[in-house]
């Protein structure tokens, strides 16, 4: 089962579960929920940033202007309506 499917099933379950079960689930994940993620202390995140920066600076990867991205997203969202 895909993670997205598991999330959906958990969401559906929690929305109708009785109070005792919701509290039990929360107790299990409470530490993760309350933990603040600081990407600047994440070695994998920093490594990925450095790699992408190097690829851009060396010309291996061409960047895309924000205005171009925004136009494409707006155009795409209009098509869906």
Image (cartoon, rainbow, N blue to C red):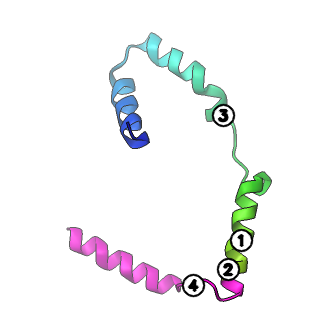
SS for tag 3? Answer: helix
From what the image shows, is residue 1 above or below residue 51?
above
At label 4, counting other C-alpha atoms closer than 10 Å, the crowd grade (few under 14, some 14-19, many 20 or more) is few
Q: Which residue is mark 2?
A: 55
Q: Position of residue 40 (x, y in %)?
A: 77, 57
- Residue span colored magenta: 56-81
SS for tag 4? Answer: loop
Q: For residue 58, which quarter of the picture?
A: bottom right
Observer-side mark, 1 or 4, equals 1
Q: Which residue is mark 4?
A: 63
Q: Position of residue 49 (x, y in %)?
A: 70, 68
From what the image shows, is residue 66 above or below residue 6?
below
Observer-side mark, 3 or 1, equals 1
Q: Which residue is mark 3?
A: 34
Per the rendering, the mark at residue 11 is none
Mark 4–mark 3 Cα distance, whole angstroms, equals 36 Å
Which residue: 37% across, 36% down?
Answer: 1
Q: Position of residue 60 (x, y in %)?
A: 63, 85
């Amino acid at each position: 089962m895909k993670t997205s499917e598991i999330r959906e099933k958990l969401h559906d379950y929690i929305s109708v579960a009785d109070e005792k079960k919701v509290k039990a689930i929360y107790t299990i994940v409470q530490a993760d929920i309350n933990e603040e993620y600081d990407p600047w202390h994440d070695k994998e995140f920093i490594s990925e940033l450095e790699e992408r920066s190097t690829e851009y600076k060396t010309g291996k990867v061409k960047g895309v202007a924000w205005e171009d991205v925004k136009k494409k997203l707006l155009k795409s969202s209009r098509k869906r309506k």
